[in-house]
Image: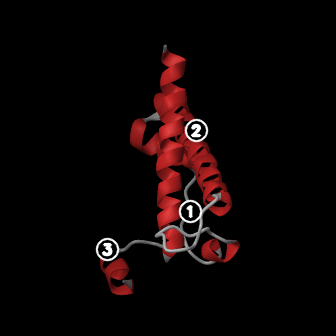
Amino acid sequence: STLALALCKIRTGRRFELQELCEVFVGKPAALLCTLLIAAYLCNWSSAVIAVTALASNAPVSDHGTFLAQCSEDDFQYNLHPVGPCWTTYSLSVLVFGALALIVALAELG
């Protein structure tokens, strides 16, 4: 991967601010709107991750002969997502949270 970076002349130490990237890609007039939309997306994403992790860790799941297992803090310690039997519970929690969020969003429209 370092050879690919050297061939493409990509500098890895450079950092960009969100406002600067938005100005580059959408121009100055739309940069504020772009920044607000990305910030709102990231805030919603982080709240969804917190809610799903809490649901998967506190779900009343029996460990006897089912494919679901209650998640613990160790399942999330060094992983982006849990592995093993906790992954199924986490995936189901994502579906439940997504369904609830969709219902709440659609109820606001009516």
Mark 3 / mark 2, whichever is N-terminal:
3
Q: Are marks 3 and 2 in contact (CB under 8 Å)?
A: no
Tag 2, which secondary structure? helix
Residue of label 2: 40
Q: Residue at x 55, y 28 (%)?
A: 104
In terms of image quadrants, where is residue 86?
bottom right
The residue type indicated by label 1 comes to Arg
User: Reading the chain from its start, which is encountered first: label 2 or label 1?
Assistant: 1
- Of the 4 image quadrants, the one containing the N terminus is bottom left
Q: CA distance from mark 1 to mark 3?
A: 17 Å
Q: Residues within 10 Å of mark 3 (few under 14, many from 20)?
A: few
Q: Position of residue 95 (x, y in %)?
A: 46, 49
Amino acid under label 2? Ala
Nearer-the-camera pick, 17 or 51: 51
- Give the amino acid type for the residue marked by disc 3 in the picture: Cys
Q: Between residues 20 and 54, which one lies in front from this camera angle?
A: 54
Task: Give me the disc on residue 15.
Answer: 1
Dot label at residue 8: 3
Asked whether residue 78 appears in the rendered view, the answer is yes
**Where is residue 2, by image quadrant?**
bottom left
Q: Is residue 69 above or below residue 39?
A: below
Pick whichever of labels 1 and 3 is earlier in the sequence: 3
Label 1 packing within 10 angstroms: few (<14), some (14-19), many (20+): few
